[in-house]
Amino acid sequence: MTARERIAANVANYVDERTGAAKWLKKNLNKVFPDHWSFMLGEVALYSFIILLLSGTFLTFWFDPSMREVEYEGSYLPLKDVKMSAAYASTLHISFDVRGGLLMRQIHHWAALIFMAAIVVHLLRVFFTGAFRKPREFNWIIGVGLLTLGIVEGFLGYSLPDDLLSGTGIRIAEAIIQAIPVVGTYLAFFVFGGPFPGEVFIPRIYIVHVLLLPGIFLALITVHLMLVWYQKHTQYPGPGRTEKNVVGYRLMPVYMAKAGGFFFIVFGITAFLGAVASINPIWLYGPYTPGQISAGSQPDWYMGWLDGLVRMAPPIETHAFGYTISWNILIPGLIIPGIIFTAMALYPFIESWMTGDKKEHHLLERPRNNPNRTAIGAMSLTFMLVSLINGGNDLIATHFHLSINQIMWGTRIGILLLPPLAFVITKRICLSLQRADRESVLHGKETGRLMMLPHGEFVEVHEPLTAEQKWTLTQHEQQGPLQIEAEDARGVRNPKSIRAKLQNRMSKAATETIAKPTAEQVKELESGHH
Amino acid sequence: MSDEKSLAPLSDPGLPAHKYRKSDIDQKAAKRAEQQVAILFLLSAIGTLLVVYSYIFIPVDSFIFLPIMGEQNAHQLFLGLGLAMALFFIGAGAVHWAKTLMPDHEEIDERKPMRSKDEDRDAFVETVRERAADSGIARRPLIKRSLALALGLVGVSPILLLRDLGPLPKDSLEKTSWATGTYLVTDPGDRKIKASDLEVGAVAQVLPELAPGKKRKLEDIGKDAVLLIRLRPEEFQLDAERLSWTHQGIIAFSKICSHMGCAVALYEQGTKHLLCPCHQSTFDVTRAAKVIFGPAARPLPQLAITVDNEGYLIAKQPFTEAVGPSFWERSS
Amino acid sequence: MRFISRFRKHRFATPVLLLVALSSIGFTFSVATAATVNSKSQAETSALIAEGQKLFLAGCSSCHGLNAEGGGLAPSLIGVGAASVDFQVGTGRMPMADMSQQAMRKKPVYNEEQVAALAAYVASLAPGPAAISNEELTWERDGNIAEGGELFRTNCAMCHNFAGQGGALTQGKYAPTLMGVEPKHIYEAMITGPQSMPVFSDKTITPEEKLSIIKWIKAAEQEKNLGGATLGRVGPVTEGLLAWTFGLGLLIGIAVWLTSKAR
């Protein structure tokens, strides 16, 4: 035993005698994680969150969350002696009078944008591969919660500097609160401590941004990761990978080195962006006052779709009995987002209801093998993209010499037409891909090489797939549609017959597939060829 | 075709044979990989040195010209690049190490189904039932009901305590600082304006004159901001009342958007349209700011103006409706 | 006359006389020359106007009418003043290259003298705002940059964006970028209100305040990149694009490298 080994043994002994953790630690340090690039997307989000905690803590040392009016005396001359809030002045101070302050501000903001982007692509990966299926529905719901909180947290952080752009954003948020029927006006007055903008809003959202929401984040992320740990990670199908095992690398040392290293890589790239690309140059925006505005006022990208929806909303307001309901704000600002996020959170249950699938799943599905789900995903994504485009319609107009009116009408029509179209097209594409899979399993891959047969006919040489490839393309389970009887054998109608019919129909749509080749068919063809 | 055998899937060939890496079989390759990892870690150390150097020796107001990017602040740039290097190369080194030198044999862990064994589940259900019976909650409805009442009510306190977050709105959304005879003054500058000061086609951003000694609050600007526009009087298509609210072709609108409260001040002289830059609601100035495009549902409130004896513009009367975005209690 | 005769004998008489004589000659001469300059400038002005009219008839009258009275294609120029001409022609907006679009800034067709001639001709039709030269605008000395920023954000940013980069208007029209525009053209635009832009009267934004605005715009134009590449100074849209493409794109690329097997 070398000296180093002795020290290690002593440490292990010390810890175990006080925690009894030896067995647990041994098991978990040996834990196997499957390796795939798409499994790193959630990690990008996690690491961005840590970067946000670190850089955000740095910023709090100087940030003054106060709307007290001050005259700017710092080193940025174009704003000298301008009246502004202490929050804005201290943000300028961080940017220009604290060395590295601007870098940290920019790292914080870039990390926030990447955090949200990583959450979204992580969510898409989980969705399109069916990783949310039983037993992982809870983790999916937590994920949707994290996404929602991330949007709120990001918006609040963007609002803290109290510059002209963020103030405009708060103004719009206030209008949304105010539009809530019956209690909206009261809610707005409670949130802002009186009429907009008041003097308490920044300190209030500050504590929410730096304490309340990060606390909830930490708790939810912990549960999210514990569930991943406990349920073990899903894996892509392939030879040797089954529902009953996990194939990958041990936590220690490979996964520790890779995951730990990846944290530094994410931080490094965020720092690189912070060094070379300006983000949120609040000194150019100027301090907020309700009488000023800038052309091209947009929110950060994760709110852009919401702004795009609000822009394209029809101008409808109801005035009745002396009260007002602003549909033009409620529909795009609260109702549609509410429906989207609720449907997203409930999707695992909806899908399981449609397909009648109540089994546990640990092998991921290839998106093409579940055409209905993939089409639903493509449809939702199209909806979001069209809204997002309209959220930047003014910039698109000036950069591509279009008219905002044209883009607005284009997206108004597009938001109704394109998502269903995306659904249909995606479903067709998935089914043709399945057909192509079937072909290549049965007849091999096209090689493009031509061969002349003895009697002069030319045929293309098809290279047979390896056993591994064939397995990967055929291992998935194909479940037929549900057959819930609307009537029993004696012709008595099932009391739940309408629901049963609906469920049958849904399940037929949800399980539509091209039959995969069976072992017998493959064998037949193989013997025929030779 | 429907019998079990003909539908049987292909069989799983199992994990493919392990392929060894160069560094597994070639000592030289392993040595090379080791050196590469070390170089990556050294690059990180150099990055930290760059951070220290930039922090201490590069003045905060020095600039450096870079192609494409233009003049950059050198302090911020090199501080950030150093930090990026210091962090990135630690990660790159660790990953390279893991990939080339750490074991890359794929391991297999068994997975147990989440569902517990049936006897465990039954035992659990039994335990819960027994313990619940021990508490006696089912047998003592008085306790059950009074507890439900108490728990139901206890949430009232925190909600009640939040009441003082803000005052009640009362009619404050309906009111602005504009009153009969209030002077229109420039924003910024606070100078009174004569009707003759504005040419046809001119605009002016105005606020109500402040009483001496009073300070202008943002929440006042948020309701009081007004835009003055001068047209040729014959260009108006207004009813008699609204026309009487203008003065020699000068018309005044609340600048706070009737949709979501942004400042609507993009006035297009050619088309006589006002555009809100937030959501592109477009208002026709000649028709009392009627909405002609976008999500806004109401025209911008018009402020009736006239002049005093010396020709300075004043408000003829306060706004006749609430300015800004809609709210539940708004009556029209 | 006794006074003079007595004076004549004074010992200073000769030099004083000489001085008076000399200065009177000088005075007369200067008056005379002044008069000639004046009349000459009038002649020059009319020549300039004539020259301008010639240019106008050749290059502008097809749309604006033979007497600048306007037509179906273009507005009347009577009363728009020299400032308007100096702005429109001096920035290359006029003559328009493509009538279907908004007149945009391009390389001027006419040189400075020709612009002055056109301006003189249009100014001779009816009084209007006078053209101004860059030298007359003492914005560097008299402007206040912070005040200019306030004024800019209240009066200009809603169309031209917070950093003067321009923005969209309705139906494909746009507010152009203010970067690289000559101070006199900024000034003239404010007093004449070209195309979609409204007029900013001297009483609501005083000439001094206009100088402050120019100073702020020039400072924004020359502002070095304090935090790195500017990304166009158009707000969060380009930032989001970069976060997705470069930020997340690169990270995904690295994730692919990280999870691939070493050879």
Image: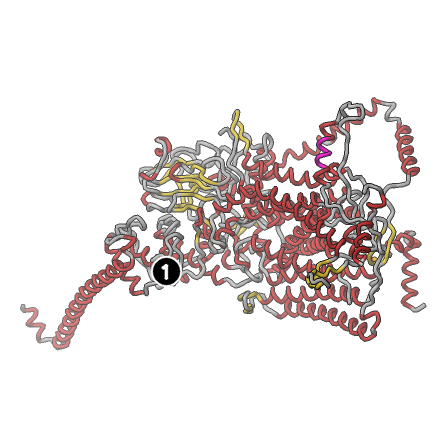
Side of C193 relative to B143 (left or right): left
Residue type beneath disc 1: Gly
**Any magenta on residue B186?**
no
Q: Which contiguous range is marked in magenta?
A: A501-506
The residue sitting at the right extreme is: A1
Camera-nearest residue between C115 and A336? A336
Q: Residue at x 81, y 61 (%)?
A: A254
Instruction: Residue under label 1, please give it.
Output: C92
- Under circle 1, the secondary element is loop
Rendering quarter of residue C215 = bottom left
Quadrant in which the C terminus of chain A is drawn: bottom right
Find residue A151 and report its horizontal and vertical position in percent: 64, 46
The residue sitting at the left extreme is: C1
Q: Tell me if I can see residue A226 in this picture.
A: no
Q: Is residue C176 above or below residue B56?
A: above
Number of labels in the image equals 1
Q: Chain of mark 1?
A: C
Q: Tell me if I can see residue C30 in this picture.
A: yes
Find residue C9 and report its horizontal and vertical position in percent: 8, 76
Side of A147 relative to C87 (left or right): right
Quadrant in which the N terminus of chain A is drawn: bottom right
Prevailing secondary structure of the magenta residues: helix
Q: Residue at x 70, y 71 (%)?
A: B46
